[in-house]
Amino acid sequence: MSTITLGPAAESKPIREIAYETLKHAIITGDLPAGSRIVETDYAERMHISRTPLREALRKLERDGLVEYMLRRGVIVRAFTIADVEEIYTIRNCLEMITLPAIIHNATPQDIARLRAILAEMDPLNEAGDAAALSPMARRFHAELTAISGLKRTIRAIEGQDEYITRFSALSIAKENRRSAAHVEHHELVNLVEKKDLEGFESLMRKHIERSKETCLRALEESNLRRNSRD
């Protein structure tokens, strides 16, 4: 049985929110894999909380589509479907596109230098084909790029999807052809920001994030086929 403990800052948030965030993180990262049963009495005891806030957290997770109530089985962690992943990427990509004009408007030479420093760290990882190390660096690059926009509400909405994206983006970057092409595109994106070329920036970013989504979906489909063939 996996160990689930409440996250920090319980004093500043309702217990139900801390329970929700803790369980959500465990589900998204795979610590609570698809098919796991969440028995209220067991998890309330393990998390040192009463069943009422846990039940409220589970209802919120159900609305998120992360768990489902099944007859005679109780609360079960749902598997992510192709449709789930496609929707998550679509939301994330639309939000990222909103930030592009503000990035072009706000970007300073210091911002460009910071982005190029990240890419310089990524260059040898790409050459080595180190997908495990490159994936978090790619997410860091996009986070730094988006932050230049200064659109705090949009950035918070993006961050709300990024926990999901963290789990799936490694599928995309593990594909050798896409990994190398995406890294080249990262360099080109910075060049376009430096030139204040909004049209070119929007065009390349739209292709960049859509290609990543499509690659991830193909990789997920292949993974599902392999799993089904073993069952």
Image: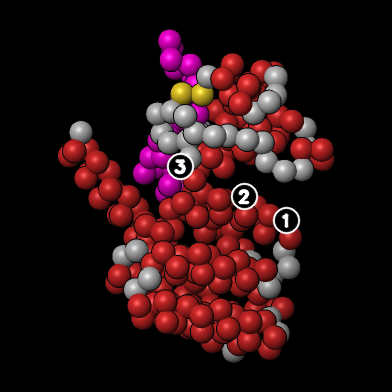
Of all residues, the one furthest to the top in this rendering is: 72
Q: Nearer the viewer, mark 1 or mark 3?
A: 3
Q: Which residue is mark 1?
A: 153
Q: Nearer the viewer, mark 2 or mark 1?
A: 2
Q: Which residues are magenta?
A: 67-87
Question: Amino acid under label 1?
Answer: Arg
Mark 2 to mark 1 CA distance (whole Å) = 11 Å
Counting residues from the start of the chain, the first of labels 1 and 3 encountered is 3
Element at label 3: loop
Q: Which residue is mark 3?
A: 30
Question: Residue 112: horizontal and vertical position, in percent?
Answer: 63, 84
Counting residues from the start of the chain, the first of labels 2 and 1 encountered is 1
Question: Residue 43: horizontal and vertical position, in percent?
Answer: 58, 24
Residue 68 in sight from this viewpoint: no
User: From the viewer's perspective, is residue 203 above or below residue 197?
Assistant: above
Q: Is residue 231 magenta?
A: no
Element at label 2: helix
In which quadrant is the C terminus drawn? top left
Q: Residue at x 47, y 29 (%)?
A: 1
User: From the viewer's perspective, is residue 177 above or below residue 49?
Assistant: below
**Among the 4 quarters of the image, the one containing residue 153:** bottom right
Mark 2 to mark 3 CA distance (whole Å) = 17 Å
